[in-house]
Amino acid sequence: MKGWMYILECADGSYYTGSTNNLDLRLAQHQNGEGANHTKKRLPIKLVYFEEYQRIDEAFNREKQVQGWSREKKEALINGNLNDLHHLAECTNNTHYKNYKNENI
């Protein structure tokens, strides 16, 4: 069964990431306040991005991956700036090996 990972932009500018096996139905549910708590409090919503998968579990796994991303990284995906994704994924934490090593040379 096919699946979709999707990103919605809510009326307050926040993003909601989800997955479904029926994109049209799920969007209608969100728009009618029958979707997730996050979206029903922030109507109306707008579909800003989606990816289609051959299986719903693949879409669900992608949903969980993208949910963990920063707003900046989600916007790079939405805007098609795929070259920025790798850079935005880099760890800038001082405890990260690469940063610790460079600061303590």
Image: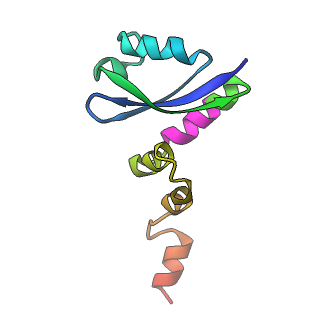
In this view, the residue farthest toward the left is 12
Question: What secondary structure prevails in the magenta region?
Answer: helix
Residue at the far front in the pictured view: 80
Q: Position of residue 6 (x, y in %)?
A: 52, 30
Q: Residue furthest bottom?
A: 105
Image point (51%, 90%), residue name: 105
Image x and y of residue 1, in percent? 73, 17
Name the foreground residue: 82 vs 88: 82
Residue pictured at 46% horizontal, 46% vertical: 79
Residue 59, percent from left and from top: 63, 30
Q: Is residue 15 left or right of residue 3?
A: left
Magenta includes 100? Answer: no
Write the start and end of the magenta stretch as one range.
Answer: 60-68
Q: Is residue 1 left or right of residue 83?
A: right
**Left or right, 50 with reference to 37:** right
Q: Residue at x 33, y 17 (%)?
A: 40
